[in-house]
Protein backbone atom coordinates (compact mmCIF):
# COMPACT_ATOMS: atom_id res chain seq x y z
CA UNK A 1 0.00 0.00 0.00
CA UNK A 2 2.92 2.33 0.67
CA UNK A 3 3.71 2.54 -3.03
CA UNK A 4 0.51 4.55 -3.51
CA UNK A 5 1.85 7.38 -1.35
CA UNK A 6 3.54 10.53 -2.61
CA UNK A 7 5.80 12.26 -0.06
CA UNK A 8 4.74 15.78 0.86
CA UNK A 9 6.99 16.47 3.87
CA UNK A 10 9.91 14.11 4.37
CA UNK A 11 11.11 12.80 7.72
CA UNK A 12 14.12 15.12 7.99
CA UNK A 13 12.11 18.27 7.33
CA UNK A 14 9.41 17.13 9.74
CA UNK A 15 11.82 16.37 12.58
CA UNK A 16 13.79 19.58 12.18
CA UNK A 17 10.59 21.66 12.27
CA UNK A 18 9.48 19.80 15.43
CA UNK A 19 12.79 20.74 17.09
CA UNK A 20 12.14 24.39 16.20
CA UNK A 21 8.63 24.22 17.62
CA UNK A 22 9.91 22.70 20.87
CA UNK A 23 12.39 25.58 21.21
CA UNK A 24 9.71 28.16 20.44
CA UNK A 25 7.46 26.72 23.15
CA UNK A 26 10.31 26.54 25.67
CA UNK A 27 11.14 30.21 24.99
CA UNK A 28 7.54 31.14 25.79
CA UNK A 29 7.20 29.12 28.99
CA UNK A 30 10.74 29.23 30.41
CA UNK A 31 10.88 27.42 33.75
CA UNK A 32 7.12 26.95 34.02
CA UNK A 33 5.78 23.44 33.67
CA UNK A 34 3.64 22.69 30.64
CA UNK A 35 1.08 19.95 30.04
CA UNK A 36 1.04 18.60 26.50
CA UNK A 37 -2.47 17.32 25.89
CA UNK A 38 -2.33 15.02 22.89
CA UNK A 39 -5.49 14.64 20.85
CA UNK A 40 -5.76 10.90 20.14
CA UNK A 41 -5.06 9.09 17.99
CA UNK A 42 -3.56 11.23 15.25
CA UNK A 43 -1.34 13.48 17.39
CA UNK A 44 0.44 10.68 19.28
CA UNK A 45 3.55 10.56 17.09
CA UNK A 46 3.89 14.34 16.95
CA UNK A 47 3.36 14.77 20.70
CA UNK A 48 5.98 12.17 21.61
CA UNK A 49 8.63 13.72 19.35
CA UNK A 50 7.76 17.25 20.48
CA UNK A 51 8.13 16.23 24.12
CA UNK A 52 11.43 14.45 23.49
CA UNK A 53 12.75 17.66 21.94
CA UNK A 54 11.32 19.83 24.73
CA UNK A 55 14.10 20.89 27.07
CA UNK A 56 11.97 21.84 30.08
CA UNK A 57 9.43 20.60 32.63
CA UNK A 58 6.60 18.88 30.82
CA UNK A 59 3.92 16.31 31.46
CA UNK A 60 1.65 14.52 29.04
CA UNK A 61 -2.06 13.85 29.04
CA UNK A 62 -4.50 12.69 26.38
CA UNK A 63 -7.98 13.48 25.20
CA UNK A 64 -9.94 11.71 22.50
CA UNK A 65 -12.68 13.02 20.28
CA UNK A 66 -14.16 11.65 17.12
CA UNK A 67 -15.22 13.93 14.33
CA UNK A 68 -14.20 12.36 11.07
CA UNK A 69 -15.53 9.56 8.90
CA UNK A 70 -13.48 8.59 5.81
CA UNK A 71 -12.54 11.72 3.89
CA UNK A 72 -15.50 13.84 4.97
CA UNK A 73 -15.93 15.57 8.29
CA UNK A 74 -19.32 14.90 9.81
CA UNK A 75 -19.12 18.16 11.72
CA UNK A 76 -20.25 16.40 14.88
CA UNK A 77 -17.73 16.10 17.66
CA UNK A 78 -18.05 13.47 20.32
CA UNK A 79 -15.85 13.33 23.42
CA UNK A 80 -14.59 9.75 23.75
CA UNK A 81 -11.85 10.07 26.40
CA UNK A 82 -12.27 13.12 28.65
CA UNK A 83 -9.64 14.96 30.68
CA UNK A 84 -9.61 15.02 34.47
CA UNK A 85 -10.20 18.48 35.91
CA UNK A 86 -7.40 18.08 38.49
CA UNK A 87 -4.91 17.56 35.63
CA UNK A 88 -5.96 20.80 33.93
CA UNK A 89 -6.85 23.27 36.68
CA UNK A 90 -4.16 25.97 37.18
CA UNK A 91 -1.83 24.32 34.63
CA UNK A 92 -0.30 25.60 31.39
CA UNK A 93 -2.12 23.49 28.83
CA UNK A 94 -0.86 23.03 25.30
CA UNK A 95 -3.37 21.17 23.15
CA UNK A 96 -1.49 19.18 20.52
CA UNK A 97 -3.26 18.16 17.29
CA UNK A 98 -2.16 16.48 14.09
CA UNK A 99 -4.01 18.77 11.67
CA UNK A 100 -6.49 21.66 11.65
CA UNK A 101 -8.97 21.42 8.84
CA UNK A 102 -12.39 23.02 9.40
CA UNK A 103 -11.25 24.12 12.87
CA UNK A 104 -14.26 22.54 14.58
CA UNK A 105 -12.30 20.04 16.68
CA UNK A 106 -9.90 22.59 18.12
CA UNK A 107 -12.67 25.11 18.68
CA UNK A 108 -14.59 22.51 20.65
CA UNK A 109 -11.51 21.37 22.62
CA UNK A 110 -10.37 24.87 23.57
CA UNK A 111 -13.83 25.62 25.00
CA UNK A 112 -13.85 22.26 26.76
CA UNK A 113 -10.44 22.85 28.40
CA UNK A 114 -11.29 26.45 29.37
CA UNK A 115 -14.22 25.19 31.47
CA UNK A 116 -11.67 23.41 33.68
CA UNK A 117 -9.89 26.66 34.58
CA UNK A 118 -6.36 26.10 33.30
CA UNK A 119 -3.72 28.72 34.13
CA UNK A 120 -3.23 29.19 30.39
CA UNK A 121 -4.13 27.44 27.17
CA UNK A 122 -2.37 27.38 23.81
CA UNK A 123 -2.70 25.19 20.73
CA UNK A 124 0.00 23.46 18.73
CA UNK A 125 -0.61 21.76 15.42
CA UNK A 126 1.66 19.83 13.08
CA UNK A 127 -0.26 20.72 9.90
CA UNK A 128 -2.67 23.49 9.04
CA UNK A 129 -5.06 23.60 6.08
CA UNK A 130 -6.23 27.24 6.30
CA UNK A 131 -8.23 27.08 3.05
CA UNK A 132 -10.65 24.55 4.62
CA UNK A 133 -11.66 26.57 7.65
CA UNK A 134 -15.37 26.64 8.57
CA UNK A 135 -15.00 28.22 12.00
CA UNK A 136 -12.58 30.99 12.88
CA UNK A 137 -9.52 29.36 14.42
CA UNK A 138 -5.79 30.12 14.50
CA UNK A 139 -3.31 27.84 16.27
CA UNK A 140 -0.53 29.38 18.39
CA UNK A 141 2.16 27.02 17.07
CA UNK A 142 2.01 25.62 13.54
CA UNK A 143 4.41 23.09 12.02
CA UNK A 144 3.51 23.48 8.34
CA UNK A 145 0.74 25.16 6.42
CA UNK A 146 -0.38 22.94 3.53
CA UNK A 147 -2.74 23.11 0.59
CA UNK A 148 -6.05 21.28 0.51
CA UNK A 149 -4.85 17.67 0.25
CA UNK A 150 -5.95 14.62 2.22
CA UNK A 151 -2.71 13.68 3.95
CA UNK A 152 -1.59 10.53 5.74
CA UNK A 153 1.40 9.36 7.75
CA UNK A 154 3.10 10.31 10.99
CA UNK A 155 -0.09 9.61 12.95
CA UNK A 156 -2.58 10.57 10.25
CA UNK A 157 -4.65 7.73 8.85
CA UNK A 158 -6.85 6.72 6.00
CA UNK A 159 -9.29 4.24 7.55
CA UNK A 160 -6.69 3.47 10.24
CA UNK A 161 -3.91 2.75 7.73
CA UNK A 162 -0.63 4.62 7.13
CA UNK A 163 -0.25 6.09 10.64
CA UNK A 164 3.20 4.50 10.97
CA UNK A 165 4.77 6.25 7.97
CA UNK A 166 7.63 8.46 9.27
CA UNK A 167 6.73 11.22 6.79
CA UNK A 168 3.63 13.10 5.61
CA UNK A 169 2.27 12.00 2.26
CA UNK A 170 -0.85 11.91 0.18
CA UNK A 171 -2.52 9.17 -1.79
CA UNK A 172 -1.72 9.20 -5.52
CA UNK A 173 -4.69 9.02 -7.85
P1 LIG B 1 -11.36 19.66 11.91
O1 LIG B 1 -12.24 19.52 13.10
O2 LIG B 1 -10.36 20.77 12.02
O3 LIG B 1 -12.16 19.73 10.64
O4 LIG B 1 -10.62 18.30 11.71
C1 LIG B 1 -9.65 17.84 12.49
C2 LIG B 1 -9.50 16.35 12.32
O5 LIG B 1 -9.88 15.91 11.01
C3 LIG B 1 -8.05 15.97 12.46
O6 LIG B 1 -7.72 15.74 13.79
C4 LIG B 1 -7.97 14.73 11.61
O7 LIG B 1 -8.33 13.60 12.38
C5 LIG B 1 -9.01 14.92 10.54
N1 LIG B 1 -8.40 15.39 9.28
C6 LIG B 1 -8.54 16.58 8.69
N2 LIG B 1 -7.84 16.67 7.54
C7 LIG B 1 -7.23 15.47 7.40
C8 LIG B 1 -6.34 14.94 6.41
O8 LIG B 1 -5.93 15.56 5.42
N3 LIG B 1 -5.90 13.66 6.63
C9 LIG B 1 -6.29 12.91 7.70
N4 LIG B 1 -5.80 11.69 7.80
N5 LIG B 1 -7.13 13.38 8.64
C10 LIG B 1 -7.60 14.65 8.51
Image: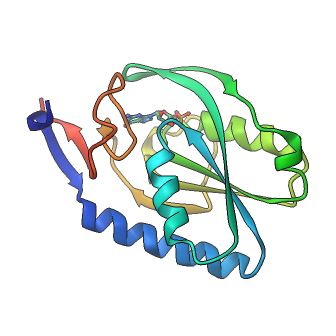
Quarter of the image with the C terminus is: top left
Between 77 and 159, the one lying in front of the other is 159
Q: Quadrant of residue 18?
A: bottom left
Q: Residue at x 46, y 38 (%)?
A: 132
| Residue 130 placement (x, y as % from top left) | 47, 48
Is residue 130 visible in the rendered image? The answer is: no
Instruction: Please tell me whether residue 172 is drawn above or below residue 160 in the rendered image.
Output: below
Q: Residue at x 35, y 66 (%)?
A: 15
Instruction: Please tell me whether residue 164 is drawn above or below residue 73 in the rendered image.
Output: below
Q: Residue at x 62, y 32 (%)?
A: 64
Residue 34 as seen in the image, left or right of residue 128? right
Quarter of the image with the N terminus is: top left
Residue 136 as seen in the image, left or right of residue 128? right
Instruction: Please tell me whether residue 24 is drawn above or below residue 37 in the rendered image.
Output: below
| Residue 155 placement (x, y as % from top left) | 40, 42
Residue 12 as seen in the image, left or right of residue 84? left
Residue 15 as seen in the image, left or right of residue 96? left
Instruction: Please tell me whether residue 34 is drawn above or below residue 79 in the rendered image.
Output: below
Q: Quadrant of residue 172?
A: top left
Outermost residue to the left: 3
- Label total for image: 0
| Residue 45 placement (x, y as % from top left) | 44, 49
Between 115 and 162, the one lying in front of the other is 162
Q: Quadrant of residue 59?
A: bottom right
Colouring of the image: rainbow
Q: Residue at x 65, y 76 (%)?
A: 56
Is residue 170 visible in the rendered image? The answer is: yes
Amino acid sequence: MRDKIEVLIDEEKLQSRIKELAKEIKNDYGDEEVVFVSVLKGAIFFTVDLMKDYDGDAIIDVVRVSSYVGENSTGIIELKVPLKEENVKDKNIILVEDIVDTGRTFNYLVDYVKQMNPKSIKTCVMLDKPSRRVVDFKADYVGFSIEDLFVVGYGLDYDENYRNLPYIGYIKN
